[in-house]
Amino acid sequence: MPGIPRDLCLRCKGYRNLCGLGYCPLLRGFRGKVKMISRINDTRVDGATPPSALVGEHGYPYVNVYIGLPPSIHGDEAKKYDDPSLWFLRLGLGDIIELRSQLMYAKKKAKVNDPWVLYEEEIGLAALSRKPVDAEAELSGIPRPKLRLDPLLPPIGPTISARRIRVAGNPSLHPVLEKLIWDDVKAEEAVWTLHREGLDHYEIVRALSLGLIGTIKRRKLVPTRWSITAVDSIVAKMYLRTIHLSRPISDVLVYHAEYLYNKYTVILYPGRYSSEWIEVWMPNSLWNPHAEPSILIIHDDYWGRPEKMDGGFLAARTPILEHLASVRRQAKVIILREVAPQYIYPVGNWQIRMTVAEALRRGPVLRNPMKKELLTYLRRTHSVPTHIYDHIVKKIYNERQTTIDDFKK
Amino acid sequence: MVRIVYPEAKYIKSIIDVLAKLADEVAFQLTSDGLRVKALDPARVALIDIDLPPTAFLEYNVPEDTIAGISTANLAKLLKKIKKGDKFVMEVTEDTITITVESISRRKYRFRNMEVPVPDIPEAKLEFNVEAQLLVDVIKHAIKDAEAVGDTLEIEAPDEVTLYLRGVGTTTTETKLTRDMAALIDLVVKEPSKSAYQLEYLKHVVNLTRIAEIVVLRFSSDMPLEMEFSLAEGRVKYLLAPKAI
């Protein structure tokens, strides 16, 4: 398991809880897989897709399209296998691992500039449905549960190539989305329309990645990972238009929320828009096997152009821009993310987007704190290296830049 | 119709790259005195002032004062593939702007002449206590060095013969220049001065070091810094407000 030293697992064998999680992530995932595979006894598998669909990026432009099916699970029951908004704040990491490992992925090859193949089989439409859709896959073999002690592989369900995927149920789409599929509208516009209609982030991502929106002649399959960030980036661009026309806020506001061993503190302070993302991975956490915390800092400028493309940063920025646009104010933003070693399974960046949104929904925990107050608060809630706190405090209280107007005569 | 031809499109590109970092849209003011562009960044910290006299152009046909409103981001994108020796031709009518890049082929771009208000630019009458003339490479390297250690460049002239360019952060870097060095062409100090500027803004002008050889720095203690880049014909001035202490 990532983050957990392997010899610890060998000594623990799943019952001594040496990793401190209170459950064994390996067994939890394995149990899910066994549960699922016991329901498959033929190469023909049926189930309802929650919906869940992914487009891989390896081998681009020849990519894999994955359809997630929980075998023999039908109707609304299937929804919970892939629905971050249902999981958020209700499920722990262990529950998510167990659910995820019960989802079998049927794989098909496709060429990115030929999304029409998916139209024929209605896979695309099924993937955009608001309700689970019954489907049937003819697999090339029967999956077997395997317990993998691989430090890099999260416990996900097996992927198996499918000879044929047949959609049996009726997909039910959001009316606006249904219309946009037939419209010859640029993807950027379509994404923004869907976002304003209040569609879930991942619904829009699926529409974009399966090539169901965009100028008709130029539709393409977009690897899921890319389209997640593309949607964030489009939405941010639109919100920034409103934000640029708004007045700066006059207070320093501090927000905080945590979920799945990820802590977020968002600080808004007076000034023209720009943001800073500080991501700290504690020692021994998922992407940091070293003994020192590793730190990533990314800025973006007034126009919202980040120095480096980072999916996590863009995901965290979206709810903040949405908030600023809704109150019609601009502000300088600092987002601090601290990842604890217990976060052993990367669930996806919905976790970032939703936790930051939750922090803003809860309202500020501090309003116009004194320098000392803010420092104490940060020290109490986070355990990142102290120079980060100094950096933040310095940015907010010392960063005084004069303007040319100050020297007008 | 207004038509101007600039002999080296690469120079225009460097200038546009700097403009694009400061403002979305800029107004090119074409008068009989030449091409003038003034732009202020949204935070009102930096001001750029470009002045290219008619003599800088191969052809300068401006029968009446005209303003060309241009989206800098778009133009920067168009000029990406420019080669050395390409000619830059701009034609402006009331509604459209046509830009032609003449090289081995002729590439034409036409876009709408946007209505860009000429920004209300604070006319700051500033007195500078220090004036230093130096080779652009020195300032370029000082900015790059300072970027490696922090976010501030401190400039200090403690006496009549020395100039320091310091990068200040957790560690510091220092470039020391004295009168007897070839890189410092001239230094006039009326009063010892020291001031600090944000690199965030200074690094934009690094692009300009490609098209000029000499830069004149003017500043006073905790007052704006003026950098003047002299081109073969014309000049670019960059005024930057200091960090407050």
Image (cartoon, coloured by chain):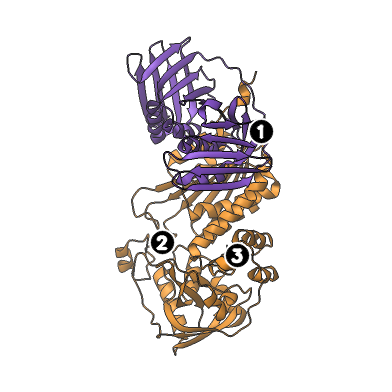
Chain colours: A orange, B purple
Residue type at tag 3 = Thr
Category of crowding for the residue at label 2, using alpha-carbon neighbours closer than 10 angstroms: few (below 14), some (14–19), many (at least 20): few
Residue beneath disc 2: A20
Q: Which mark is residue B66?
A: 1
Q: Is residue B6 left or right of residue B145?
A: right
Mark toward the viewer: 1 or 2: 1
- Residue extending furthest toward the bottom: A42
Mark toward the viewer: 3 or 1: 1
Category of crowding for the residue at label 3, using alpha-carbon neighbours closer than 10 angstroms: few (below 14), some (14–19), many (at least 20): some
The answer to whether mark 1 and mark 2 are in CB contact below 8 A is: no
Mark toward the viewer: 3 or 2: 3
Considering the numbered disc 3 on the image, is that residue within a helix, a strand or a loop? loop
Q: Is residue A323 visible?
A: yes
Measured as percent of width and height from the top left, residue A56 is found at 45, 68
Q: Are marks 3 and 2 on the same chain?
A: yes
Total of numbered circles in the picture? 3
Measured as percent of width and height from the top left, residue A151 is found at 34, 65
Q: Is residue A364 left or right of residue B105?
A: right
Camera-side residue: A345 or B104? B104
Of pointers 3 and 2, the one earlier in the residue sequence = 2
Residue type at tag 1 = Thr
The answer to which image quadrant residue A139 occupies is: bottom left
Q: Is residue B242 visible?
A: no
Q: Are marks 3 and 1 on the same chain?
A: no
Camera-side residue: B245 or A206? A206
Quarter of the picture containing the C terminus of chain A is: top right
CA gap, disc 3 and disc 2: 51 Å
Q: Residue at x 39, y 70 (%)?
A: A26
Chain where mark 2 sits: A
Q: Is residue A115 left or right of residue B65?
A: left
Residue beneath disc 3: A215
